[in-house]
Amino acid sequence: MKKNSICFLAFLFLVASCKEKKNVVAAPPPGSPNAAAVSVEGFMIKPTAISETFDVTGNILPYEATEIRPEISGRVVQLNIKEGTNVARGTLLVKLFDGDLQAELKKLKVQLQIAEKTEERQRELLKISGISQQDYDLSLLSVNNIKADIELVEVNISKTEIRAPYAGRLGLRNISPGAYITPVNVLTTISQVNQMKMEFSIPEKYSSQIRNGMDVNFRIDGSNENYKAKVVATESSVEQNTRNLRVKAVINAADKYLVPGNFAKVEVVLGKNNEAIMIPTEAVIPVSRNKQVVLYRGGNASFVDVSTGIRDSSMIQVTQGLNFGDTLITTGLLFLRNGSKVKLSNIK
């Protein structure tokens, strides 16, 4: 009896299962006339102003920096190098012994006086044909030779005076009073710090967009200020090893934080586009060889190939494939096919 009851229950279960299978209707595929519209959100494409920027690192340098060396050898008799101070152009920094040169200069000046008197007398004699033209020319030559010797000695005397080539700040001195120095000795350094420059390198793909006179922004550690520099020159060619182009910019700002040798974080703004198409990055669908987006057209989803440009944390530029006024679908992209029915629930 119990066995018969079990068989009866199994029969009822089979009958009920068959009825349920008969009542199941296959869901219409996406894009068919009977498919239900998918609720999605849209994004209206409008003109957007963007600036293409990139960041590089740079070094702040003095506008001019020079190692002070003597042109001749000699003993230091006067030392005026005050470390870390600012000096004017032409300030005497070091004086070398020039006693022998001064004595030679006096000797030549005496010889010049005698030679000039001899030349005057012979000129008067030449007028009355008392001497030949050749004798007079020799006396005039003697005068000119002595004058040339005097100029040479005066130049050598000037080399015993080492002066500041321009206004700037002196570095540490490397000699002491009374030292004997030669042209290989670096006496000190001088840097022009009232105006500074900055050097940085940019990737070669941007080399054609860098031009003299354009401004760049930069920041340095220890300061919250945003500084500006003006591009004044670029290297004549791209470096083969790094594929970068060296750029020099002038800093006109005066600030205690701007110290030669500082590391700078440079931001280069290449240009501004007021008619750019910017869309949310999540709306871009990567495919095998290109990128696609989904547009809302007459209640249907339409897949379109696009080309992209620069991007930031949330938006990306579209350079080809879209127009102003298009409505972009930004949600439910995984459930859509080309031609799927969609219903906009919200447009941004």
Image (tube, rainbow, N blue to C red):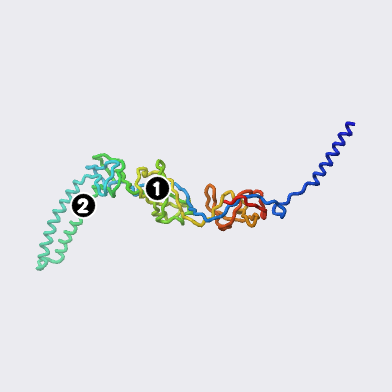
Image location of residue 208, percent across then percent down: 46, 57
Q: Nearer the viewer, residue 291 or 242?
A: 291
Which residue does the numbered mark 1 point to in the structure image?
Answer: 227
Q: Amino acid at mark 2?
A: Glu
The answer to which of marks 2 and 1 sits earlier in the sequence is 2
Residue 338 can be seen in this image? yes
Image location of residue 31, percent across then percent down: 69, 54
Image location of residue 117, percent across then percent down: 11, 59
Q: Which one is closest to the eye, mark 2 or mark 1?
A: 1
Is 125 above or below relative to 80?
below
Q: Amino acid at mark 1?
A: Tyr
Q: Is residue 284 left or right of residue 192?
A: right
Residue 185 can be seen in this image? no
Q: Nearer the viewer, residue 141 or 195?
A: 195
Q: Is the residue marked by circle 1 packed among few (<14), some (14-19), or many (20+) residues within 10 Å?
A: some
Which residue does the numbered mark 2 point to in the structure image?
Answer: 154
